[in-house]
Image (tube, grey):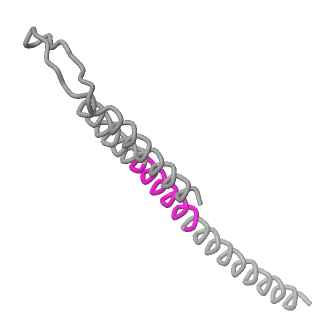
């Protein structure tokens, strides 16, 4: 459900930005470049499009970072669960061994009591 809402919002945003860019095709912006020490003029839609592309690239990079972090957390959680299951199996084995020892001691005690009688 959240995925569908985010897709719809992204499409609405793209349509809105596209409409805004088509309405501002004619204006130009004069920018000062300190490296060339001069002014140059660019159309507004070119600057806006470059900012949109930068935003998309940054969004992808942030999602990669957060996905990698979640994958690391998931693998750590899996290792912890495996350790707990191995420990549980070990505890079960120890418990069975103790039960058999108790049964052996009970049988030995009963045999010893029978011999004394």
Q: Is residue 78 magenta?
A: yes
Residue 113 in percent (x, y) is at: 87, 86
Closer to us: 91 or 42: 42
Instruction: Give the residues drawn in magenta, as a range.
Output: 67-85
Q: Is residue 43 above or below residue 95?
A: above
Q: Main secondary structure of the magenta part?
A: helix
Residue 110 in percent (x, y) is at: 84, 87
Closer to us: 50 or 57: 50
Residue at 43 percent of width and 54 percent of height: 71
- Choose top left, top right, bottom left or bottom right for residue 2: bottom right
Q: Is residue 83 left or right of residue 44?
A: right
Residue at 65 percent of width and 77 percent of height: 97
Closer to us: 48 or 76: 48
Q: Is residue 83 magenta?
A: yes
Residue 81 in percent (x, y) is at: 55, 62
Residue 38 in percent (x, y) is at: 10, 10
Q: Quarter of the image containing the N terminus?
A: bottom right
Q: Is residue 40 above or below residue 25?
A: above
Q: Is residue 45 above or below residue 42?
A: below
Q: Is residue 91 above or below residue 26?
A: below
């Amino acid at each position: 459900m959240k995925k569908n809402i985010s897709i719809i919002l992204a499409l609405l945003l793209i349509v809105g930005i596209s409409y805004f860019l088509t309405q501002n095709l004619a204006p130009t912006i004069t920018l000062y470049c300190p490296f060339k020490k001069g002014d140059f003029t660019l159309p507004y839609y070119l600057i806006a499009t470059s900012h949109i592309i930068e935003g998309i690239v940054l969004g992808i990079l942030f999602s990669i970072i957060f996905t990698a972090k979640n994958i690391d957390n998931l693998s750590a959680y899996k290792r912890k669960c495996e350790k707990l299951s191995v420990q549980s199996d070990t505890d079960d084995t120890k418990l069975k061994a103790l039960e058999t020892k108790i049964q052996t001691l009970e049988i030995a005690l009963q045999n010893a009591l029978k011999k004394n009688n």
